[in-house]
Image: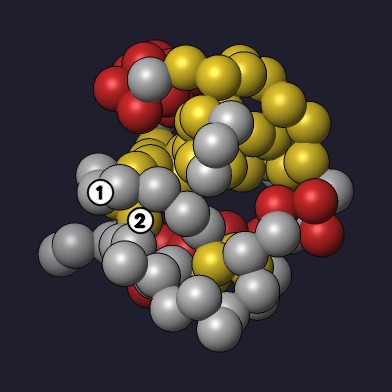
Amino acid sequence: MPDMGKPHCIKRLPTKVLVKDVSEEEAIEYVRKHTREHYEIPPDYEIRNICILGKAPMLVGIKERKKKLIFTFTRPCFGTDVLEMDTTPEEIETIRSDLRKD
């Protein structure tokens, strides 16, 4: 369960909704299918200081050449969405170092 004291309002991130109100399984499959590089997000993981909500496993996918992140987010009472956001090489490296399992 994420710490409810941490900010979790997804509207604070500049995202585009790719897929709206799907099952968590469908969202995970979308990320796997549309990114070659993806990582499992622990329940309390933050992107730009926003706690990503959802039940494990959740994924974040990296589109390095396009400088995009694709990730799942569950909005209470609304369901799970797949979101896309512009990113930076530094942010990609942070995600890799945080989530890569060697």
Give the image quarter of residue 85: top right
Judge whether 68 appears above or below 18 on screen: below
Give the image quarter of residue 50: bottom right
Which label was assigned to residue 45? none
Identity of the residue drawn at 51% across and 30% down: 79
Q: Contact, CB < 8 Å: mark 1 with mark 2?
A: yes
Q: Where is residue 98 in the image (x, y as percent from the top left)?
A: 38, 72
Give the side of residue 93 with respect to residue 11, left or right.
left
Judge whether 43 appears above or below 44 on screen: above
Identity of the residue drawn at 40% across and 70% down: 2
Q: Is residue 73 visible?
A: no
Of the image marks 1 and 2, the number of the one nearer the N terminus: 2
Amino acid on which disc 1 is placed: Ala
Which label was assigned to residue 41? 2
Question: Can you name the residue that lies furthest to the front here?
Answer: 77
Q: Name the residue under label 1.
A: 56
Callout 2 environment at 10 Å: few (<14), some (14 to 19), or many (20+)?
A: many
Q: Where is residue 47 in the image (x, y as percent from the top left)?
A: 60, 65
Identity of the residue drawn at 15% across and 64% down: 102
Task: Give the SS element for disc 1.
Answer: loop
In this view, the mark in front (1 or 2): 1
Amino acid on which disc 2 is placed: Ile
